Amino acid sequence: MLEGNVVAVQCTSSALYRPFALYLLFVHLLRHKETSVDLILQTAVNSMVASSFFALMAVGLVLIFGVMGIVNFAHGELYMVGAYSVWFLYSANGWPFWLAVIGAFVIVTLIGLLMERTLFRPMRGNPLGGLINSIGVLFILQVLAVQLGGVGLMKTVIPPFPGSTTILNGVSISDQRIAALIVAIGLLVAMWLFLTRTRLGWALRAVSQDSEAAALQGININRISMLAMGLGAGTAGLAGALISPMTRVEPYMGHGVIITAFIVTIVGGIGSLSGAVLVAVLYGFFYTFVTTYVSGTVAMMLGLLIMLFVLIVKPNGLIGVRASE
Amino acid sequence: MLLEIQDIQVHYNKVAALKGISLKVEEGDMITLIGSNGAGKSTTLRTISGLVHPSVGQIRFKGQRIDRLSPDKVLKLGIAHVPEGRRIFPGLTAIENLRLGAFIRKDKQAVERDLERVLDHFPRLRERAHQLASTMSGGEQQMLSIGRALMSKPKLLLLDEPSLGLAPVIVKHIKEIIGEVNREHGVAVVLVEQNAELALDLSRYGYVLETGSIAIEGEAKGLMGNEHVRRAYLGL
């Protein structure tokens, strides 16, 4: 209830209420959580996990937007399908966890390639059409998840690594999170190396900077679109797969994820990979700390407020490049 | 005959941009298309490189029909296009831009040699090698765009408004570069220019485009003496 007050007061822009809101927030923090050093450290560790997953989702979204000019609204649902695939393969059918994760990657990548071929390619040069198509995919995947998995009972994926490791006195991290963190960071590094060190990576960046000039260098735009969509969808699927043992698997789990990914990509500057990663890290910390000390709802509302503020003050985002230059 | 265009027509949403254009380019030749804005000069180049396809007519390169091919296939046959406005990749370095020019080539060692040759040819690009292309000056970007096109080892170079928006000193330098590319590299050039004086001075043969058709054509020297060309395009 207090959270509601805080938000309501924050939303009224009257200067009179602003100190009061901060006071309420402060009281709230003190009353509900002991602000010990341990908790801060623990939250920082959790933030790193959140940051890496935000970055994975945002990078995929930026790749797809850059190459095809399409905002993929179904990105959160690709993440959801990744989580469902692990639930289906690992929990329901007893595959080894890592094999199920690979399976999830393959399934979601294939869905992404299919989306590119059948829905996005005919919409090239028509961003609105692509956007509407992606919203269609969002609903189709949600309904499929409900049809195949049922709604109501949330699916749980029993963590394959139930233990936890103590880093410092009082600060521990579950082995599940460690594994997810390592894989997520590994993936981000691999993608960075691919984009900056390989011919195909340059080609992909070239297409996102100027697709016609890229075509004039002999770069096949269709192939690069498939590559971007495969990479974008695949990483979203992997993110969902890796997170599945730490969350509830349900058909609408992509919803919060896509909002977060939008906040990160817009604040970072649409089309900017480095901006997306930087803001993902910052926002991961911000979101996790606010969630721990206040609540997840407030964290997301503040995130959206920050996004609106950035859109007003710096419409190209923090590291946004002007498209025409 | 290197390139032969026979009576092509191009339509954008049923509006005719080219109403029947024919032209010829010999091996190692240098021809120019001059004309005002919207005459169809850029469209002609875009049609040759496969960015747009003609609704009527044929384009032959070394005898082979290319008017239905995609840009990457046209490039592989040996036609490189330096688009209007330079269109370098702003977020990549100069070197990365040049290497992308050789994207279609598989002969890695020869690509490295050609990269050195282009950097020798454009010392300014060597100085800026690891700088983001967006931070380079207009003249440097134009050199980069031409260098990038040369990296594909073309037999025919399509140049769209290389002097556009550049200071007179730089224009002179770019003009020399185009001449050198044609003479020293033996690359045939189709030059599209609004700067008719520069274009006719460089070229052997010229075509004057007016609203999608060829109004006048002839030896460049002769066109410079043509009364209509002098009045309409040379401002004399």
Image: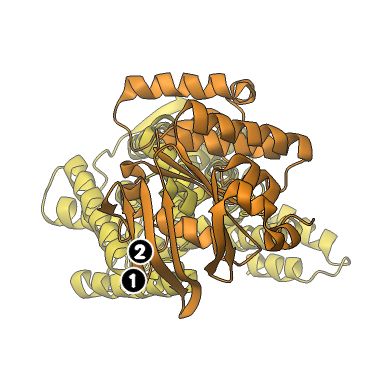
- Count of numbered labels shown in the rendering: 2
Query: Chain B's shade in the image?
Result: orange
Tag 2 subunit: A
Query: Looking at the rendered structure, which numbered label has been put on residue A77?
Result: 2
User: At x 82% / y 62%, what residue is drawn?
Assistant: A18
User: What amino acid is labelled 2 in the image?
Assistant: Glu
- Type of amino acid at the residue the image marks with label 1: Val
Residue at (71, 71) in percent of width and height: A8
Is residue A228 visible to us here? no
Whether residue B160 is situated above or below residue B125 in the rendered picture: below
Tell me, what colour scheme is on the image?
by chain
Q: Between A1 and A149, which is closer to the camera in this rendering?
A: A149
Q: Which residue is mark 1?
A: A137
Residue B171 occupies quadrant: top right
Q: Are marks 1 and 2 in contact (CB under 8 Å)?
A: yes
Q: Nearer the viewer, residue B234 or A149?
A: B234
* Disc 2: CA contacts within 10 A as few (<14), some (14-19) or many (>=20): many
- Chain containing the residue with disc 1: A
**With respect to residue A126, does B117 lie above or below?**
above
* In the image: residue A217, left or right of residue A91: right
Which chain corresponds to the colour yellow? A
